[in-house]
Structures are given as C-alpha cells and as structure tokens.
Amino acid sequence: MVKTNLNIFSEFYVGIDIGRYKIDGVKIKHNGKRSDIIGVHSVPYSSKVFDGDELVNEDEIINGLVEIGKFLKIDIEDFITTAIFSDKVLFRQLKMPKMRNKKQIIEAAKFQIVKELSISSSNITVDVDLLGEGNGLSISTFIVRNEDIEKFKSFFVRSNLPVPDILDAGYFKFNYLLESKINHGLSFFAFEDSMSTYLQIFRNGRFLSIDSVTGGSEELRENNAVDARVHYLQLSDDIQRIARILISRYGLSNENIENFVCISERDEYLNEWVESLKEMDLGKVNDYYDFVSLKREIPAGAYSMAIRGALENAKSKFLHKEA
C-alpha cells in the first residue's frame, strides 16, 4: 500500500508477517520468473501482545523482529515487504470520472474521503485500485492514518532493521500467491484475523471488493474441538451471507463460484473451517495451502509478501508514498 524506498537493484526479497500470535519471515532470491527460498523463520510470542485490537506489548514484536533479522541475515540491500494490521486500514469504494493519471485520482479520492470522514488530508495516506466502468472509474480506496504508518515503521527502526520498502494492508498479505490461481470466473477469499474475518471477491482474477464480519480466531479456546465446530459454523454462516450480498451488489447472480479459499491466523483449525464452509453450498472450498500448493511449513503471509516484493520491483511499479 505504501512504498517507502526505491531499492531497484535487489536480488533478495523478504516478507515479514507481524501476526497476532507470532512473527514470520521468509527470504527469497528472485531471478526472472524463478524464486528460490533462502531462509524461513518464525518467532511465536512468549506473552500476550494484543488485548482485542489493542497492542499491549511492543517489546515482543521488537524482540521477534530482531531474531528474524539475525536468522535471515537481513541487510540494507534486501527488499522488504510487510503488512500493517488489518484493523488499521479503512476500505472505501468510490465512483469518479476518468482522470489523466493515478496521482490525480488519488488526490480526488482524498478530497472525497476527507469530506466523508471529516479528517485532515495531512493525517492520512491513500492508495487506490482502479476498475474501468463506462466513461468513469470505480475506485477501491485504502486509507491509513499516518501515525499508524509511522508506528509500524518504528518497529523496524527499533529492531535495527531497514524500513520496509512496501507496507501493505494486512488483509491483502495472502493475495500475491492467490492471484495467479484465480484468473477465470468468480472467486472468494476469506481471511480470519484475531478479531474480524475478511471476505474478498474476485472476478477473472480482478479484485472487486472486500467486506468483513466481527468474530475471529480470538474466540477459539485451546484444544476444544466442540467450541471450534460451533465457532466455524457460525462464522461460515456469516461469510455465506456476505458472499450473497457481494454477488447481488455486483450483479453476478448468474455466475458460478469457481473458487472459495480460506485461511486463518490459527491454522491448526483450518480443516475445521473448510468442513464448515463445505456445508454452506459455496462451490468448491479449499484451504489456502492446498489451493496455492504451498508446503505448510512455509509461512503463507510472509512468503506471499516476499513474492509481491519481487513482482513489484521487477515491474518498477512504485506505490504512492505521501499523504
């Protein structure tokens, strides 16, 4: 979402996923279309880091980043991609006339968002994803407070790591392996965070929208299969409701759902969720690891973000930086 450096000569790409229960890091070497994994490391938190959505223990994050940096031998030449917490990113869809370039579109979107949210434009950073629509544009807008960006970047500074080159939205951190698999038809992707669950809809590989429901992996009790079953039946029912709303909103009721893919911060319960979703008549349901053919010992979010870094750098696609 936010591009901070122009490190265009990198061969090594690092994805760092600061999750609710652990920090994952993956380092790859990318050469053309080939990506080789150089190192993988995970650091579970030794004490509680979040109380609901509130961050209550920054030291655990700092210590985890220090360990990740040492294990992966991260240096200033590595291209780093990470993701800001999902609850810190606001999503809005806007419709606007066509404009000359992305910078003009972002400024127009910011003007509209400032009016809607009654917030100063100097306090937010905005990025956009564009969909053509007749003579106008349908714009997916992502808004982050600058203070949250600076807080997230400070974790890396305090860990003596380079500031990330790309700071993405947390609910997008799995998308960059997924997108190559959903080129045709209607697809849904659901991500269960600790407090909320996010549902994205894609058509022919193109992101259309995102919605969410309250309730996430924090509700699960350790090693309690009965509670997990009840939790995922309720969650799957809520997800089905949102899926139908999105299908109706975009006039897609005549199209079949080709793929329904899900993943959770608590991957030990992923099979339980898959089985619950299969009961909801949502088409072919897969867990993320099976769908993208990823070994389960590889942290999915961190690896996906490392791949994004390589693809962004290879395309020289530099994202908007300033508010």
Image: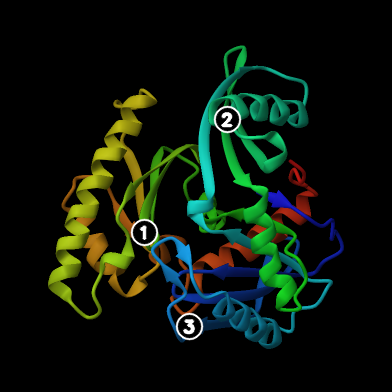
Q: Nearer the viewer, residue 200 or 88?
A: 88
Which of the 4 quarters of the picture holds residue 61? bottom right
Q: CA distance from mark 1 to mark 3?
A: 19 Å
Dots 3, 2 in contact, CB < 8 A:
no
Q: Which tag, 3 or 2, sits closer to the chain's start?
A: 3
Q: Could you tell me which residue is drawn at 28 percent across and 50 percent down?
A: 284
Q: Is residue 288 left or right of residue 16?
A: left
Callout 3: SS: strand
Q: Amino acid at mark 2?
A: Ser
Residue 120, placed above or below residue 72: above
Quarter of the rendering containing residue 311: bottom right
Instruction: Inspect the image, locate mark 1, and give the three-letter code of the amino acid beneath it.
Output: Met
Q: Residues within 10 Å of mark 3 (few under 14, many from 20)?
A: some
Instruction: Please give left or right for residue 48 compared with residue 99 in the image.
Output: left
Q: Earlier in the sequence, mark 1 or mark 3?
A: 3
Sequence-earlier tag: 2 or 1: 2
- Left/right of residue 300 with respect to residue 153 in the rendered view: left
Residue at image location 58% in from the left, 35% down from the top: 141
Q: Position of residue 276 (x, y in %)?
A: 19, 58
What label does residue 44 carry, if any? 3
Q: Is residue 143 above or below residue 61?
A: above
Q: Does residue 142 appear in the picture of this structure?
A: yes
Q: Which one is in front in this view, the residue at disc 3 or the one at disc 2?
A: 2
Towards the viewer: 288 or 229: 229
For residue 28, above or below residue 71: above
Element type at mark 1: loop
Residue where numbered disc 2 is placed:
118
Q: Is residue 202 left or right of residue 13?
A: left
Q: Which mark is residue 195?
A: 1
- Residue 148 in percent (x, y) is at 62, 55
